[in-house]
């Protein structure tokens, strides 16, 4: 991986490809992400251009003595090696920003990802729930 | 049923909130209401962020519940905004009264009002009673959560 850098407005086409989503809502979400202080959106670049993306959200809560924790999500990559680079970036960046814990979610059916994340030190510890509005 | 109101937390609520966080099977091992310094600093940061909302349930003078709601943008799901619910606690003397469900419904409504397409939360795998509670409120187990201690 050549570089991991903050996403820019001009990355929208590459992000549309990575997410397989329509451009307009994604462009609006990209603007929102770039303007949200507790969110860092990055892209990974190699010789062929943008090869992956990840979002780190850093939040403060009252629990755990007012601890700061990170949420690493929205990871999309063209190959496993890029995912590894983005996970390493997320862990380093979360530590640098004073997080005491880093959370990572994956779909329920992706048992293989659990083993992959374990190599980075992640342990399965909670159940995620969602409710559509 | 006692009358109560749900409102934004204030600085002088922090002691009562931390006591609720600590009065819990998991919180008891990690939260200590004796020294409020770190909690007050966290509160100031939450208070300064328009995307984060710490609320309390007040029954007269007494605080009987709390919850933190964070609005998070993202690229997944066509760039949907999400409401993330955390640190849900109901005072021990007020559990089983429907208050927790009312507080969660408040968080769902507030997320909708702020334009979110979904509400998400995570719950420690050991909290099986809480999992049933969230499912009754329309939440579905949708992802597996991993954690790394830094």
Image (cartoon, coloured by chain):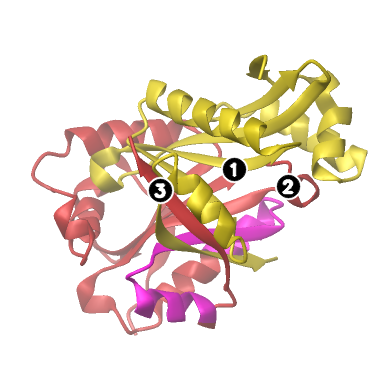
Label 1 near label 2: C-beta < 8 Å?
yes
- Reading the image, the residue beneath label 1 is A73
Give neighbour class at mark 3: few <14, some 14-19, many 20+ (Cα, 10 Å): many
Determine the colour of chain B: red
The chain containing the residue under callout 1 comes to: A
- Reading the image, the residue beneath label 3 is B147
Work out whether disc 2 and disc 3 sit on a shared chain: yes
Residue A27 place in picture, x, y as percent: 84, 33
Is A20 displayed left or right of A45 in the figure?
Answer: right
Q: Is residue B73 visible?
A: no
- Give the spatial CA distance, label 3 vs label 1: 12 Å
- Give the spatial CA distance, label 2 vs label 1: 9 Å
Of label 2 and label 3, which has the lower sequence position? 2
Is A128 displayed left or right of B111 in the figure?
Answer: left
Is A27 displayed left or right of B10 in the figure?
Answer: right
- Give the spatial CA distance, label 2 vs label 3: 21 Å
């Amino acid at each position: 991986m050549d570089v991991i850098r903050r996403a820019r407005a001009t990355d929208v086409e590459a992000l549309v490809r990575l997410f397989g989503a329509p451009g307009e809502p994604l462009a609006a979400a990209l603007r929102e992400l770039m303007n949200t202080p507790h969110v860092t959106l990055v892209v990974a670049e190699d010789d062929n251009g943008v090869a992956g993306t990840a979002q780190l959200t850093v939040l403060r809560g009252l629990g755990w003595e007012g601890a700061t924790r990170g949420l690493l999500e929205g990871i999309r990559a063209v190959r496993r090696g890029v995912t590894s680079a983005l996970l390493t970036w997320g862990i380093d960046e979360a530590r640098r920003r004073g997080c005491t814990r880093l959370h990572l979610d994956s779909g329920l059916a992706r048992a293989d990802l659990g083993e992959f994340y374990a190599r980075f030190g992640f342990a399965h510890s909670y159940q995620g729930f969602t409710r559509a509005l | 049923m006692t009358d109560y109101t749900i409102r934004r937390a204030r600085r002088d609520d922090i002691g009562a909130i931390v006591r609720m966080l600590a009065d819990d099977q998991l919180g008891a091992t990690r939260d200590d209401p004796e020294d409020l310094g770190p909690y007050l600093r966290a509160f100031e940061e939450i208070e300064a962020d328009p995307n984060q909302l710490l609320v309390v349930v007040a029954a007269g003078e007494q605080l009987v519940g709390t919850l933190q709601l964070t609005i998070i943008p993202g690229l997944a799901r066509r760039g949907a905004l999400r409401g993330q619910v955390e640190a849900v606690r109901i005072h021990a003397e007020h559990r089983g009264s429907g208050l927790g469900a009312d507080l969660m419904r408040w968080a769902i409504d507030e997320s909708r009002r702020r334009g979110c397409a979904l509400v998400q939360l995570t719950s420690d795998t050991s909290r099986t009673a809480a999992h049933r509670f969230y499912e009754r409120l329309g939440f579905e187990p949708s992802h597996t959560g991993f954690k790394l201690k830094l």
